[in-house]
Image (spheres, rainbow, N blue to C red):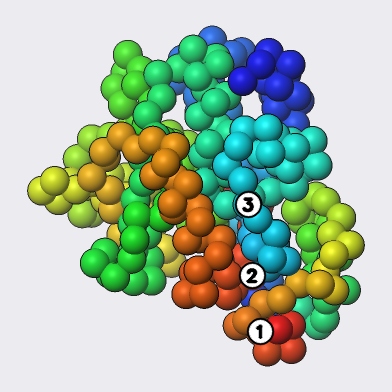
Amino acid sequence: MTSKALAAYLDRIGWSVETTPTLDTLAGLVRAHMQAIPFENLDVLLGRPVSLDLDAIMTKLVHARRGGYCLEHATLFAHVLEELGFGVARHSARVTLVFRRHEVGRLHMFLTVALPEGVFVVDPGFGGPAALAPVPLTDAGLDGPGGATHWMARDGDHWILRTLIAGEARDAWVSTLERDGPADFVVANHYTATHPASPFVNRLMASRRTVASA
Amino acid sequence: MTNRDATIRKGEETRTFPLADRAALRALVADHLGFDFPEVDALRVPFVPEWN
């Protein structure tokens, strides 16, 4: 990502303060990103291709002030964090809010960020159920710490993002935390945007977190 | 927004309502997602028969 692209992105999310790679900066950027850039799949429903090329994502999410789905959000946010000096890893997960883990592919993209305080899960493209803040990658058990809306739980070789929905703790997604690369996400993106069984091909989905709803 | 159902949450208050038509969808996108969506008439949503 170029410095010019970074400046355009920061302007898009309304971020004009600290950019040193700290936990506070990360938390602020996650929140600002999710409040500024919506989650939506409208292009899929128009039959348009969805590109994970950074220039294409910049054109759509930043310059055209549109939104996108997880693969677009997480790809953009990873480039931003890397440009700012954060240590970022890209991962995929099986979303388990509707289906059981063996019924779904690894189609969701999220990030982990390593900081002196520990490793944090960052998930800017999960739409309505997403955490507005970095989630510590520590095993908080199925019930989680009191007062948390999102936490991680370990299940053997898997990590589960747990979240409260209508007061009930649910599995949101599950991941092995393997580091995935561009080819993995191209495959996930192709299925997500074009397969007749993909929820994104069949349903209209859109959301934005506003300051008031945060 | 899921298909034709829109939900707006403000604090503890939640309001869910159906979108009347494509024009209502375009207005909601402009008001809450922050961009104009003139291609709304070309949208095809298989799970919404009247928009398929």
Inter-mark Cα distance, 3 to 1: 22 Å
Residue A89 screen position, x and y as percent: 37, 29
Towards the viewer: B43 or A138: B43
The part of the image, by quadrant, that contains residue B24 is bottom right
- The chain containing the residue under callout 3 comes to A
Residue at the location (84% across, 59% down)?
B37
State if disc 1 and disc 3 touch (CB < 8 Å): no
- The chain containing the residue under callout 2 comes to A
- The chain containing the residue under callout 1 comes to B
Is B38 situated above or below A152?
below
State if disc 2 and disc 1 touch (CB < 8 Å): yes
Q: Are marks 3 and 1 on the same chain?
A: no
Tag 1: amino acid: Val
Q: Are marks 1 and 2 on the same chain?
A: no
In the rendering, which numbered label is found on residue B48?
1
Q: Nearer the viewer, mark 3 or mark 1?
A: 3
Residue at the location (58% across, 70% down)?
A201
Q: Residues within 10 Å of mark 1 (few under 14, many from 20)?
A: few
In the rendering, which numbered label is found on residue A204?
2
Q: Residues within 10 Å of mark 3 (few under 14, many from 20)?
A: many
Assign a secondary structure to mark 3: loop
Residue at the location (62% across, 33% down)?
A54
Q: Residues within 10 Å of mark 2 (few under 14, many from 20)?
A: many
Would residue A8 appear left or right of A164 to someone viewing this image?
right
Would residue B8 appear left or right of B29 to someone viewing this image?
left
The part of the image, by quadrant, that contains residue A178 is top left
Tag 3: amino acid: Val
Inter-mark Cα distance, 3 to 2: 15 Å
Assign a secondary structure to mark 1: loop
In the rendering, which numbered label is found on residue A50?
3
Q: Nearer the viewer, mark 3 or mark 2?
A: 3
